[in-house]
Amino acid sequence: GLTSEYDRQVMDQVFDLSYYTKGGFPFEQVYNMPVNVRSYYYAKLVAIKEAEADAMEKAQQQNKGSR
């Protein structure tokens, strides 16, 4: 069967896609998505969040340099 680690990974993806899209993906919709579709959307979400974090860090560094 499936491992508890895989189950946790799926639930983390379901939560993150539901939470960070602010309802754009309802829980049930994400949970019932085909694995490849959910994985695609999750990878896009991670990439977007990483880009946001990088932009925030860059802005903070520029702000420190201008003081």
Image (cartoon, helix red, strand yellow):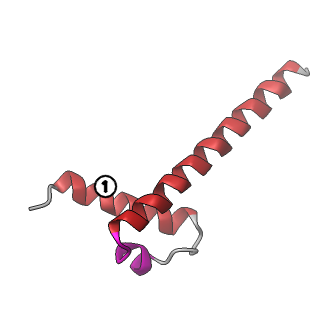
Q: Position of residue 19 (x, y in %)?
A: 52, 65
Which residue ends up furthest to the right in the rendered image? 66
Q: Residue at x 91, y 22 (%)?
A: 66
Q: Quadrant of the N terminus?
A: bottom left
- On whether residue 65 falls in the magenta region, the answer is no
- Dividing the picture into quadrants, the one containing residue 27 is bottom left
Total number of numbered discs in the rendering: 1
Q: Residue at x 66, y 36 (%)?
A: 54
Magenta stretch, residue numbers: 27-34
Q: Position of residue 13 (x, y in %)?
A: 40, 60
Q: Residue at x 83, y 26 (%)?
A: 62
The overriding secondary structure of the stretch rendered in magenta is helix
The secondary element bearing badge 1 is classed as helix
- Dividing the picture into quadrants, the one containing residue 36 is bottom left
Above or below, 9 against 32 in this view is: above
For disc 1, the marked residue is 9
Above or below, 36 against 60 in this view is: below
* Residue 14 as seen in the image, left or right of residue 41: left
Q: In the rendered structure, which amino acid carries the disc numbered 1?
A: Gln
Above or below, 62 against 47 in this view is: above
Q: Position of residue 48 (x, y in %)?
A: 61, 50
Taking the image as drawn, is residue 25 in sight?
yes
Taking the image as drawn, is residue 14 in sight?
no
* Viewer-closest of 31 and 57: 31
Q: Bin the neighbour count of mark 1 within 10 Å (Cα to Cα): few under 14, some 14-19, many 20 and up.
A: few
- Dividing the picture into quadrants, the one containing residue 59 is top right
Q: Residue at x 49, y 64 (%)?
A: 17
